[in-house]
Image: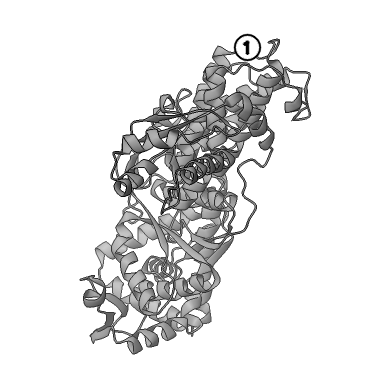
């Protein structure tokens, strides 16, 4: 609905400029002012015109204001210094706006782009730890956001089956007689991680093991040993089985799992190397590498092939990205900030080859107060442990707050709140910020995700008290509402509801989901203020307020869905 209001404001300004015989060179832009005392929308076009008219911006604004009509949705338009401020007539706006909010509110139906979004892609050498899930949650939220904003999104997990870590696990199986027990009570990816830790211990005792691992890598890359190939595949799949289970607990799934080995076996890696040699950017000094200093300002070379002839992750990654760029209009990668150099090198290689370069969302690391983690050293907090702890703490808090809940529902709602707490805590911060995960903040009923879920449950409870609410539908039409004097808490809530599609578009444009997390928190806060200050059931404005409650419930639910968080009807 705000789109209609913004377009009307633009037309009002265009008409005013026409009457003054003035022409704006760029598109007229409208912004949201820092506070509502300055109106609902503001324009700074006076700055541009002031230079041409050789007048002050303040004088230009006063001149324009005299020529403006208010249109359908505005009650006044004022000049405040150089700014032209529009004030919405909410009594005229509200009925049209509320009619626009349905169950799919926020969904853009047009299909703009096919986007290949890669996220998580943890090495298959053990369970996911808390660091990995920041990648997965950012990627999954972004996927949901991009789909809602009108794109076809394919999510991929890039499986590093040819990496050294995987070869070390296979070495442990073949040479150290280590194995995983599929019947063990331990989750299978944890067993794989334990095996990997034991091989690292052996490597510390005997560094010559590295040569044996190198030989395994070379042999697997050649593909000539069916038995070796089978062991690689078996243990990678063991790990992926556990990883998928963990991701599913967090409401994360992938459309495709792409194994890097396929790019070697298909000849794609060799073709990439040949094309790069033809480009003239490669040099050879024991190893084949890309010299990127002159053309790209990158002083670190990108090694393409080892001295023994085997490929590197970087070479296989180039082949993978070429494949992605050929099938997608846009390629998006979610990577830790420690990958910035490698990503620049990769993009340079793709540019040389004439392929699309990816849009990369870099994120800083996430830790617990206990410290950092290392799979190699066996010092880490697994995502499974984090999830279990979140659910446990949620349950303990609910037992204090809601002692009347039966055990079955208590278990269910504890899981919803616990998973929501983890996802929201990660999603709410921009990826550029380092996170130390704090339980008191994550599970706060006052400012965490649960406070948003509680606002949704509150809305549901209110609606169920009305005889107009049946089977999830509110049987009220805006046409039934007459003489509705809007209160400030209602206007504040309507303003936020109207911004939802704009937040979706802006978040998708900059590939950042924390804007949506902040938005839904603000919406829940505004709803709680409305709830505390306004009587709904039995008030003379009951029908109108029930409509607002219902539209808020829909918007909170749809916003939480973008964040991959369930919106319960009762807490």
Instruction: Name which residue lies at 47% across and 46% down.
Output: 506
Query: Which of the two residues, 210 or 46, is positioned nearer the viewer here?
Result: 46
Residue 275's place in the image compared with 120, above or below, is: below
Going by the image, does 76 lie left or right of 381?
right
Going by the image, does 265 lie left or right of 546?
left
Crowding at dot 1, Cα within 10 Å, few <14 / some 14-19 / many 20+, comes out as few
Task: Give the position of the N terminus as an image quadrant.
Answer: top right
Q: Position of residue 282 (x, y in %)?
A: 28, 84
**In the rendered image, which residue does mark 1 sit on?**
535
Q: Position of residue 84 (x, y in %)?
A: 41, 34
Does residue 564 show up?
Answer: no
Task: Write down the quadrant of residue 285 in the picture.
Answer: bottom left
Residue 311's place in the image compared with 341, above or below, is: below
Instruction: Name which residue lies at 71% across and 10% down.
Output: 538
Q: How is the image coloured?
A: one colour
Query: Which of the two residues, 417 or 233, is positioned nearer the viewer here?
Result: 417
Instruction: Name which residue lies at 59% across and 54% down.
Output: 150
Residue 233's place in the image compared with 370, above or below, is: below
What kind of element bears circle 1?
loop
Q: How many marks?
A: 1
Does residue 262 show up?
Answer: yes
Q: Position of residue 12 (x, y in %)?
A: 52, 40
Going by the image, does 494 lie left or right of 50?
right
Q: Position of residue 554 (x, y in %)?
A: 64, 34
Query: Which of the two residues, 492 or 42, is positioned nearer the viewer here?
Result: 42
Instruction: Name which residue lies at 31% across and 70% down.
Output: 345
């Amino acid at each position: 609905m705000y789109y209609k209001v913004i377009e009307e404001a633009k037309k009002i300004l265009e008409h005013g400029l026409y009457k003054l015989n003035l022409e704006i060179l760029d598109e007229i832009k409208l912004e949201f002012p820092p506070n509502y005392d300055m109106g609902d929308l503001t324009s700074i076009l006076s700055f541009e015109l002031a230079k041409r008219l050789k007048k002050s911006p303040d004088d230009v604004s006063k001149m324009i204001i005299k020529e403006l009509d208010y249109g359908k949705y505005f009650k006044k338009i004022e000049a405040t210094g150089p700014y032209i401020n529009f004030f919405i007539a909410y009594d005229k706006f509200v009925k049209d706006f509320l009619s626009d909010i349905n169950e799919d509110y926020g969904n853009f139906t047009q299909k703009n782009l096919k986007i290949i979004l890669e996220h998580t892609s943890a090495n298959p050498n053990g369970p996911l730890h808390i660091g990995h899930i920041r990648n997965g949650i950012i990627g999954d939220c972004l996927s949901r956001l991009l789909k809602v904003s009108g794109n076809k999104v394919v999510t991929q997990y890039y499986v590093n089956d040819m990496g050294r870590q995987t070869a070390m696990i296979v070495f442990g199986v073949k040479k150290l007689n280590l194995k995983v027990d599929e019947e063990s009570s331990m989750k299978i990816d944890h067993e794989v991680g334990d095996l990997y830790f034991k091989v690292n211990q052996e490597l510390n005792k005997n560094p010559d093991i590295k040569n044996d691992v190198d030989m395994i890598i070379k042999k697997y890359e050649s593909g000539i040993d069916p038995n070796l190939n089978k062991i690689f595949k078996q243990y990678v799949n063991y790990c992926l089985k556990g990883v998928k289970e963990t991701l599913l607990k967090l409401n994360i799934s992938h459309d495709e799992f792409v194994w890097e080995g396929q790019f070697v076996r298909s000849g794609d890696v060799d073709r990439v190397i040949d094309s790069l040699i033809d480009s003239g950017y490669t040099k050879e000094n024991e190893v084949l590498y890309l010299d990127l200093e002159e053309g790209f300002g990158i002083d670190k070379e990108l090694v393409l092939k080892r001295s023994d002839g085997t490929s590197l992750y970087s070479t296989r990654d180039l082949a993978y990205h070429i494949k992605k760029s050929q099938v997608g209009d846009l390629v998006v990668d979610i990577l830790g900030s420690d990958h910035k150099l490698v990503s620049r090198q990769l993009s340079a290689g793709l540019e040389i080859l004439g392929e699309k370069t990816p849009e990369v969302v870099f994120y800083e690391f996430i830790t617990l107060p206990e410290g950092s983690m290392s799979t190699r050293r066996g010092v880490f907090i697994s995502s499974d442990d984090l999830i279990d702890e979140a659910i446990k703490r949620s349950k303990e808090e609910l037992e204090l707050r809601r002692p009347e809940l039966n055990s079955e529902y208590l278990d269910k709602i504890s899981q919803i709140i616990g998973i929501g707490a983890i996802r929201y805590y990660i999603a709410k911060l921009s990826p550029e910020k380092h996170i130390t995960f704090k339980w008191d903040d994550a599970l706060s009923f006052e400012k965490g995700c649960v406070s948003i879920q509680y606002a949704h449950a509150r809305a549901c409870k209110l609606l169920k008290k009305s005889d107009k609410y049946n089977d999830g539908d509110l049987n009220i039409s805006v046409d039934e509402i007459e003489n509705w004097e809007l209160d400030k808490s209602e206007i504040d809530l309507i303003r936020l509801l109207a911004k939802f599609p704009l937040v979706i578009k802006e978040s998708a444009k900059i590939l950042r989901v924390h804007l949506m997390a902040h938005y839904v928190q603000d919406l829940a806060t505004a709803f709680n203020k409305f709830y505390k200050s306004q009587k709904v059931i039995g008030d003379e404005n009951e029908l109108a307020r029930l409509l607002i409650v219902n539209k808020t419930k829909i918007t909170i639910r749809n916003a939480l869905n973008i964040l991959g968080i369930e919106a319960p009807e009762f807490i």
